């Protein structure tokens, strides 16, 4: 499990594989100075609710991975996540597509 830390006040744990894909999508949006929403369902251990954050290029974000090796990247998943990030409701988590073209990054 890796950790996404936002504005040094909010931390959320995600599987390293998912976190690597989120890093690519979030990084691409912020690199273009595009702000957007990102939401996820919270774990039952913290109330089973939902968290939504407004990602903006001026607010610090960090990605801390548990594993030392970067996972293979599923291009189809990146494309789907990027489409969501460009929608008014923003980026949210979806399952990884089963058919993929994977690249090592």
Image (cartoon, rainbow, N blue to C red):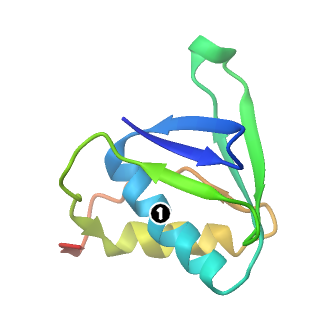
Q: Which residue occupies the foreground of this view, 71 or 92? A: 71
Q: Position of residue 1 (x, y in %)?
A: 36, 35
Q: Is residue 60 above or below residue 86?
A: above
Q: Which residue is drawn at 22% across and 58% down?
A: 71
Relative horizontal placement of residue 97, taking residue 46 as reference (left or right): left
Give residue 90's quadrant in the image.
Answer: bottom right
Relative horizontal placement of residue 5, taking residue 64 as reference (left or right): right
Q: Which residue occupies the foreground of this view, 19 or 83? A: 19
Q: How many marks?
A: 1
Q: Where is residue 105 in the image (x, y as percent from the top left)?
A: 23, 73
Q: Position of residue 32 (x, y in %)?
A: 66, 87
Q: In this view, does 16 lie above or below 83?
A: above
Q: Which residue occupies the foreground of this view, 77 or 73? A: 73
Residue count near mark 1 (Cα–Cα under 10 Å), binned few <14, some 14–19, many ≥20: some
Q: Where is residue 12 in the image (x, y as percent from the top left)?
A: 57, 36
Residue named by callout 1: 23
Q: Which residue is drawn at 20% across and 49% down?
A: 68
Does residue 95 appear anywhere in the picture? no
Q: Is residue 66 above or below residue 98?
A: above
Give residue 27's quadrant in the image.
Answer: bottom right
Relative horizontal placement of residue 6, taking residue 102 as reference (left or right): right
Give residue 54's quadrant in the image.
Answer: bottom right
Q: Residue furthest bottom?
A: 32
Relative horizontal placement of residue 80, taking residue 37 as reference (left or right): left
Does residue 63 appear anywhere in the picture? yes
Q: Which residue is drawn at 55% across and 79% down?
A: 28
Dot 1 falls on a residue whose secondary structure is helix
Q: In this view, does 9 lie above or below 23?
A: above
Q: Residue at x 61, y 36 (%)?
A: 11
């Amino acid at each position: 499990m890796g950790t996404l830390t936002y504005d040094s006040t909010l931390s959320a744990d995600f599987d390293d594989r998912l976190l690597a894909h989120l890093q690519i999508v979030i990084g691409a949006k912020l690199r273009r100075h595009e702000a957007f929403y990102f939401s996820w369902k919270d774990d039952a251990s913290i109330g089973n609710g939902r968290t939504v954050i407004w990602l903006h290029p001026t607010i610090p974000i960090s990605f801390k991975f548990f594993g030392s090796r970067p996972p293979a990247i599923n291009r189809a998943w990146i494309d789907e996540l990027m489409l969501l990030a460009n929608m008014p409701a923003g980026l949210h988590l979806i399952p990884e597509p089963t058919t993929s073209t994977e690249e090592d990054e």
